[in-house]
Amino acid sequence: MGIKEDIQQSEFTDEIQKLMINQLYTGKWITNIISKQLKPFGLSMQQYNVLRILRGQGEYSISVNAISERMIDKMSNVSRLIDKLVDKKLVERKINRIDRRQVDIVISEKGLKMVKEIMSIEQELKSNFSNINQEEAKQLNYLLDKLRG
């Protein structure tokens, strides 16, 4: 099925308009798939994004601002997300040794275990992309990067 059939729209003004709508629709489709995968873990996509960022830091802490800059969803309230992750004991706050006014964030052991468990089901998630091969994925990644310029 194509975007025309999926949203029951007969015509687009041009291919660029079709691309914009198709990209938005596909983005929501992917978001829904990932959200379903995260639901059993009690995490939102934004919370999982924070955990992945922190996991990438290893044992090193990172500032809230640095986390915010790396977020996929730039509209997220990172402080609120971190509060929820602290409540779940998935991350910890640390006072920055150089600037004691700054609070840094580090992933906890519990958070690391959860991220590893979620990543173990990544193959299941990837199965939703079985309609395209690695070369097509590479081409699509190139085009999306080019689109964002």
Image (cartoon, rainbow, N blue to C red):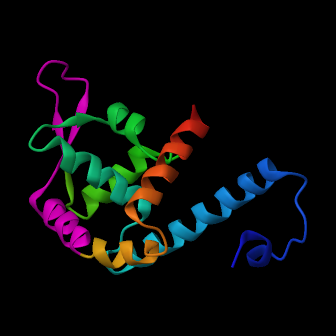
Quarter of the image that includes the C terminus: top right
- Residue 52 visible in this rendered orientation of the protein: yes
Residue most toward the top?
A: 98
Q: Residue at x 61, y 39 (%)?
A: 147
Q: Quadrant of residue 65?
A: top left
Total marks placed: 0
Q: Position of residue 8 (x, y in %)?
A: 83, 77
Q: Quadrant of residue 119?
A: bottom left
Q: Residue at x 55, y 45 (%)?
A: 144
- Residue 74 visible in this rendered orientation of the protein: no
Left or right, residue 97 beside residue 11: left
Residue 94 highlighted magenta (yes or no) = yes
Left or right, residue 16 beside residue 118: right
133, above or below 149, in the image: below
Q: Position of residue 132 (x, y in %)?
A: 47, 68
The residues colored magenta run: 93-120
Residue most toward the front?
A: 135
25, above or below 80, in the image: below
Which residue is nearer to you in this view: 85 or 8?
8
Quarter of the image that includes the N terminus: bottom right
Left or right, residue 25 beside residue 43: right
